Amino acid sequence: MRAIIAIVLFAAALAACSPDNNDVTGSIGNCARKLYSVYNPRDMKQCVGACIACDRGVTTTCSTSCTLKGAR
């Protein structure tokens, strides 16, 4: 019985650690397209600008996020 409870708790903890699906509704993409006529997520200035405006981020976290996504 303890083993079953341990397995269930482990599975629940593991499921909680899975990455979230970013922007399921596509609202960030729509927001970015409203800001830039031709939105290029690989352009650092556009990526950071869209992150700040659409995700309500700050420059530091947005630039880190954009760098990790491949913006230059």
Image (spheres, grey):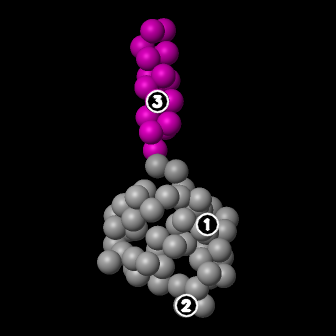
| Residue 32 percent across, percent down from the top left | 59, 77
Residue 22 or residue 65, whichever sits in front: 65
- Residue 27 lies in what quarter of the image? bottom right
Q: CA distance from mark 3 to mark 1?
A: 30 Å
What crowding class fits label 2: few (fewer than 14 Cα within 10 Å), some (14-19), or many (20 or more)? Answer: few
| Residue 4 percent across, percent down from the top left | 47, 17
Instruction: Name the residue: 49% across, 58% down.
Output: 58
What crowding class fits label 3: few (fewer than 14 Cα within 10 Å), some (14-19), or many (20 or more)? Answer: few
Q: Secondary structure at mark 2?
A: loop
Is residue 65 visible from the viewing direction of this image?
Answer: no
Q: Residue 13, which numbered label?
A: 3
Q: Secondary structure at mark 1?
A: helix
**Three-letter amino acid code at the position of disc 3:** Ala
**Cβ atoms at labels 3 and 1 below 8 Å apart:** no
| Residue 54 percent across, percent down from the top left | 61, 66
Q: Which residue is mark 1?
A: 54
The magenta span reads 1-18
Q: Earlier in the sequence, mark 1 or mark 2?
A: 2
- Residue 68 lies in what quarter of the image? bottom left
**Cβ atoms at labels 2 and 3 below 8 Å apart:** no
**Three-letter amino acid code at the position of disc 2:** Val
> Where's the C terminus, which quadrant?
bottom left
**Cβ atoms at labels 1 and 2 below 8 Å apart:** no
Q: Earlier in the sequence, mark 3 or mark 1?
A: 3
Instruction: Name the residue: 42% across, 57% down.
Output: 61
Instruction: Name the residue: 49% across, 37% down.
Output: 15
Q: Which residue is mark 2?
A: 38
**Three-letter amino acid code at the position of disc 1:** Cys
